[in-house]
Amino acid sequence: MKTERLAKRYRVEGGKHFRLKDFDPADTGHWRSKKHAQEALQQGIVQTAALQDKLYAQDCWSLLLIFQAMDAAGKDGIIKHVMSGVNPQGCQVFSFKAPSDLELQHDFLWRTTRCLPERGHIGIFNRSYYEEVLVVRVHPEILKSQKMPPTLVGKNLWEERFEDIRGFERHMARSGTVIRKFFLHVSKKEQKRRFLARLEEPEKNWKFSAADIRERGCWDDYQEAYEDMIGNTASKHAPWYIVPADNKWFTRLVVSAVVVDALESLDLAYPKVEEEKRKELEAAKKVLLSK
Ligand code: ATP
Ligand code: MG
């Protein structure tokens, strides 16, 4: 399957018929094993690196990649893998945890807005403003810490947040930020297996936190919140990708395909040298060669 087709298969651009249960976390397309996909995996990294070089040189578009998932779905590994070939100078990763006191003094889009990628750059959000319609929705008591004027917290709050997010993403897209959003779709069974590995293998112990088990207890509420979030915020200019996450190698292949597809869809090219600049380069060359 070519990159473009692989990317398209998991893309959601609108919420009308979206149901999470239509997507299988264990899907691997027509790939049978990691070994089988090895070449494509490597190719994706090489292509991303070459495209990023042009993105940076052109200094016009920017790319924002947003990752959301249940714990142990593999966000960190994906970010490490997909970005392994790119020049760190043109790429920045931000992880968003529970907000700080300063962040709580502001609206919910403030902290992420400060971290948006500059032109020519790739920005990666490991969690994002989408937590505001996920963890905050599943645990509405968090809302109290947000210090919102009580009259503004009504029964349409989540709908209003979806609307604000849609408006924000439309604005970013119109300004030249290409947005691609990934939901790493792991099954409850696979999450259990990974948690057990974190408990049993000493070198994975550090990855485990007691909060992970608490959140697992809210699995169904999270799935519902994810479904509603994706259905309400998927658009042509900021699509969601429901990436099967039970097999890490396949998750990597899909994410890499989407990144390549997104960059290829742009008119990326190295800046053309103006006549005057070209003369300057030729003169410099002459000087260098004459000594
Ligand atoms: P890992 O567990 O792989 O190290 P992580 O992204 O799960 O990475 P943690 O420190 O375990 O990092 O979790 C961050 C926590 O912060 C998550 O439970 C997330 O829901 C929470 N969080 C993120 N944004 C918000 C927010 N706006 N309000 C409240 N909680 C938030
Ligand atoms: Mg965690």
Image: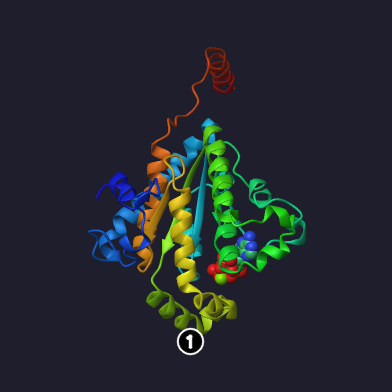
In the depicted structure, whether residue 290 falls above or below residue 164: above
- How many numbered marks appear? 1
| Residue type for callout 1 | Glu
- Give the residue at x 30% y 51%: 9
Picture coordinates of residue 14, whole percent (x, y): 39, 46
Which residue: 57% across, 60% down?
131
Q: Is residue 157 visible?
A: yes
- Point out residue 18 in the picture as x, y percentages from the top left corner: 36, 54
- Residue 61 can be seen, yes or no: no
The crowding category of the residue bearing disc 1, from other C-alpha atoms within 10 Å (few below 14, some 14 to 19, many at least 20), is few
Question: What residue is drawn where x is 57% and y is 55%?
Answer: 158
Can you say which quadrant of the picture contains the C terminus?
Answer: top right
Quadrant of the displayed image that contains ligand 1: bottom right
Q: Is residue 190 left or right of residue 161?
A: left
Q: Residue 21 is drawn in which quadrant? A: bottom left
Q: In the shown orientation, is residue 103 left or right of residue 189? A: right
The one of 169 and 77 positioned closer to us in this rendering: 169
Residue 56 x/y as whole percent:
53, 37
SS class, disc 1: helix
Establish if 212 lies above or below 111.
below
Figure check: 29 above or below 197: above
Asked if ligand 1 lies within 8 A of label 1, the reply is no
Furthest-bottom residue in this view: 200
Q: Which residue is mark 1?
A: 200
Q: Which sits in the foreground, 223 or 196?
A: 223
